Image: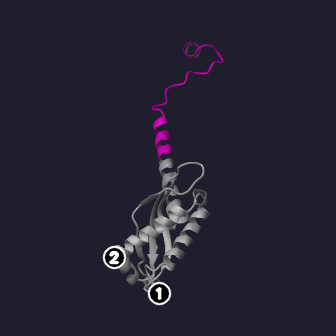
Amino acid sequence: MAEEEEDQAAEYGEEGEAPPIEDSGPSRLPQFIVLIFVILIGQGAAGYYLITQVFYAGLVEEPEEDVEKTRDRPVFEIDEPQLYALAEMTVNPPNNEGIRFLTARVTIELDSPEALAVLGEALAAAQLHDLVFATLANTRFNDMDDAKDREDIKVKLKEEINASPILSEIGEVTNVYFERFVLQ
């Protein structure tokens, strides 16, 4: 028996030392990796469900349209505007500081198709172009600089065209638009 104790002491080292740890088999690292992977997939699925079904349910599914409600809305017919566009014109408005230029493209809105037909004639179109050209050429450069000034010019053009015999009793100008208005 003493011999056995000596053999064990020689095998394990001196007295009081712990016996060496034996290899208990394969590592548990692959099991932890699989467990982490399963947890991440579960969290992703839970997040997808919460986002699509709970928080933003309306984004995933198209809302059902109520056909009756769309038919109950009133339908307004909008008359097509009667527009007459003048050719682009370049004028030299009066200015004390030097030579200045205005390039403008004017469109006129009329109240009736008959008035538009009258402006389709060559004489009426030439008279209208001359009237607009003269009005712009006689307006001082400083009176065209601001947005309010341009609105005043539109009103002045509208009044002068309506006062002229071009459209006489057939119709009148309802609005004047500047498609292009460049001061230099």
Mark 2 falls on what kind of element? loop
Q: Is residue 58 above or below residue 7?
A: below
Query: Spatial distance from mark 1 to mark 2, Cα to Cα?
Result: 45 Å
Q: Residue furthest right?
A: 16
User: In what quadrant of the picture does the N terminus appear?
Assistant: top right
- Amino acid type at circle 1 is Asp
Q: Is residue 61 visible?
A: no
Q: Splitting the image into 4 quarters, where does residue 145 fall?
A: bottom right
Place of residue 71 in the rendered image (x, y in percent of width and height, measured from the top left): 43, 85
- Image mark count: 2
Say whether residue 156 is left or right of residue 34: right
User: Residue 81 location in percent, x, y?
Assistant: 43, 77
- Circle nearer the N terminus (1, 2): 1
Q: Position of residue 136 (x, y in %)?
A: 51, 63
Q: Residue at x 50, y 43 (%)?
A: 36
- Tag 2: Cα neighbours inside 10 Å, few (<14), some, or many (≥20)? few
On screen, 144 above or below 2? below
* Residue nearest the observer in this picture, 118 or 5: 118
- Residue at the image point whose x is 57% and y is 64% from the top: 150
User: Is-magenta flag for residue 77?
Assistant: no
The residue sitting at 43% across, 68% down in the picture is 130
* Marking on residue 72: 1
Q: Position of residue 146 (x, y in %)?
A: 60, 59
Whether residue 131 is situated above or below residue 92 in the rendered picture: below
Q: Which residues are magenta?
A: 9-37
Which of the 4 image quadrants contains residue 89? bottom left
